[in-house]
Image (tube, rainbow, N blue to C red):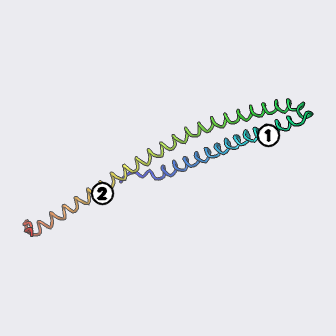
Amino acid sequence: MAKDLGALIRLQKWRVDEQRRKLADLLRQAARIEGQRAGLERELKREQKVAGLAVDYSLTYAAYARAVIERRKRIAQALVQVERQIADEQEALGGLFRDLKSFEITQAARDRAERQRIAKLDQAMLDEFGALKFQARGGIAPRPG
């Protein structure tokens, strides 16, 4: 009988699922950061319009612009960090998935070999049964037709 890899396959599937969840969390985090960046750009455009309309506000706009530049930098750094983590998690997921497929292919080959072994035994039994039946008839084969 072929050794069963079912438990190992189930464990590996669980690991793959966990890795997918981690990756999904990181992708959601990246989307949030992208949303922050888009929100900052919308806010900047709004503030630029207001600064163009109000003279007294245009005097404080420079400080606001410096703060926006700093926020952009922090957002960009956060996005780069999350994208690195995403790349690492994708690589890890790929490795786990390759291992899972390897286990599944090995199990399928073992299952196929076991089915062939059983079929060979069944055929040997049928051959023996046919030979015994032939002998019981006195060794004479029935006439065709």
Residue holding disc 2: 118
- Asked whether, in this view, residue 89 is left or right of residue 139, the answer is right
Q: Is residue 140 above or below residue 30?
A: below
Q: Residue furthest front?
A: 53
Q: Residue at x 14, y 67 (%)?
A: 133
Q: Residue at x 50, y 52 (%)?
A: 10
- Asked whether, in this view, residue 93 is left or right of residue 137, the answer is right
Measuring from the top left, give residue 125's x and y in whole percent.
Answer: 23, 61
Measuring from the top left, give residue 38's x and y in whole percent.
Answer: 72, 40
Q: Residue at x 89, y 32 (%)?
A: 60
The crowd level at tag 2 (other Cα within 10 Å; few <14, some 14-19, many 20+) is few
Q: Amino acid at mark 1?
A: Glu
- Asked whether, in this view, residue 38 is left or right of residue 117, the answer is right
The crowd level at tag 1 (other Cα within 10 Å; few <14, some 14-19, many 20+) is few
Q: Amino acid at mark 2?
A: Ile
Residue holding disc 1: 43
Q: Residue furthest right?
A: 56
Q: Nearer the viewer, residue 127 or 35?
A: 35
Pick the quarter of the image with the N terminus: bottom left
Local secondary structure at mark 1? helix
Local secondary structure at mark 2? helix
Pick the quarter of the image with the C terminus: bottom left
Which numbered tag is attached to residue 98? none
Q: Is residue 5 above or below residue 30?
A: below
Q: Nearer the viewer, residue 115 or 65?
A: 65
Q: Residue at x 30, y 57 (%)?
A: 118
